[in-house]
Amino acid sequence: MSSKKNTCIVLGVTGGIAAYKACELLRLLQKQGMDVYVVMTKHACQFVAPLTFETLSGHPVAVDTFERPATWEVEHIALAKRADLFLIVPATANIIGKMANGIADDMLSTTVMATKAPVMIAPAMNTGMWQNPATQQNIRTLEARGVHVVAPATGHLACGDSGAGKLEDVSVIAERALDVLNRKRDLEGLSIMVTAGPTREALDPVRYISNRSSGRMGYAIARAAQRRGAKVTLLTGPVAIEPPQGVQVVPFLTTQDLLEKSLAHVAEQDIIIQSAAPADYRAKEIAPQKMKKRGGADMVIELVENPDVAATLGAGKRADQTFVGFAAETNDVLEHARGKLAKKNLDMIVANDVTAPGAGFDVNTNIVTLITKENMVSLPLLTKDAVAEHILDGIISLRK
């Protein structure tokens, strides 16, 4: 890895209709703290103006090998040396062919040939071009040289065809890029179980009791733990998020379901992170048919207490296991969190006031305090991905 303050990604953009998606990818990488420099082919400029990438990245965009640079340096060599990762999205059949055959006739092909950084490409093209034996041979050649390839998805293409050749989702590409960077592998060899999302407690075949948990915090933790080398088991309630690649996904629905599946997996775990939001109560009786209005009369539903998942897991925690819980509160946040830390035999609890702006539900940010028996660290407003890294850093410190 580079000794530079910020990890640097050089993003190459080639002339395909998917070039506009590189703008979204750039923003995703920046949210992860990456410094992104862009190199475009002249054909890419027909799809997206260089000014767009200059505005988003905050850096000049390199296009012309012979253009006089703003500073006195050989630009393609400077970019090649600056890169911690060289990423080409989208990668057309043309650039793939050039790379496989050692052709360097423009700024992008020259720069990628000069770099010593890891290289990743995300191909996007017509199905026939992707399946062409020449393209497939070029891909195999690049893979044999250590180039990382994010294979295209199957779907409806801009040309009207359907099949393989569609650019993979940019969130997947960003995740793969972070995997290649291997910023931290300090969880290598450890097994981690993360629970995420809400539960649903049925009232009748149509209605249920639930809460506003989106699962984003738990998914961010699972994603970060997998990137840092852990074997991750993600127990997830019903959420509208794609699970991270490379993790074992175990769905649950009710609080009892979450408890049973947690107990089935907990023995093999080194670290348990309980970020799910199980319902405290469930209906004493579930109506067999949809309940109807009663002509103005009130309806009374009797609730019974659900088992406490975190307390049950904490009671059985081994000395070699690390157990982290969450306290999403609306008042007396630190007091309630410290109570749960002791009551549920937790090693750390992550406390947050869900009424604070930017720290509630359905947002990508959070404001949390990490509390252990000996210490308390309050974090500012951060993305949930950044909070996840802090939580994992805290766990590593606890286990030393």
Image: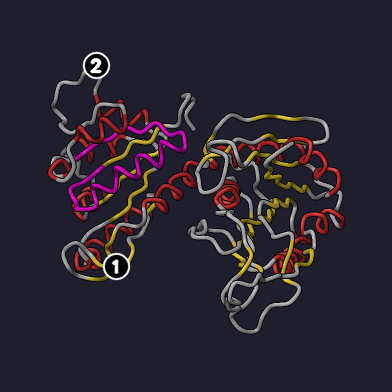
Within 10 Å of the Cα at label 1, are there few (<14), some (14-19), or many (20+) other Cα atoms? Answer: some
Q: Residue at x 33, y 36 (%)?
A: 10
Q: Which residue is mark 1?
A: 155
* Residue 288 position by quadrant: bottom right
Say above or below: 264 vs 58: below
Would residue 369 be found to the left or right of residue 8 on screen?
A: right
Using the numbered discs, state the Cα–Cα distance from disc 2 to disc 1 in whole angstroms: 44 Å
Q: Secondary structure at mark 1?
A: strand
Point out residue 137 in the picture as x, y percentages from the top left corner. Answer: 27, 62
Q: Amino acid at mark 1?
A: Gly
Q: Residue at x 19, y 61 (%)?
A: 158
Q: Amino acid at mark 2?
A: Thr
Would residue 391 be found to the left or right of residue 214 on screen?
A: right
Is residue 36 on the magenta stretch?
Answer: yes
**Residue found at the far front of this picture:** 296
Say above or below: 299 vs 245: below
**Residue found at the far top of this picture:** 72
Label for residue 71?
A: 2
Q: Earlier in the sequence, mark 2 or mark 1?
A: 2
The C terminus appears in which quarter of the rendering? top right
Q: Secondary structure at mark 2?
A: loop
What residue span does the magenta drawing correspond to? 13-40
In front here: 354 or 207? Answer: 207
Q: Residue at x 85, y 53 (%)?
A: 318
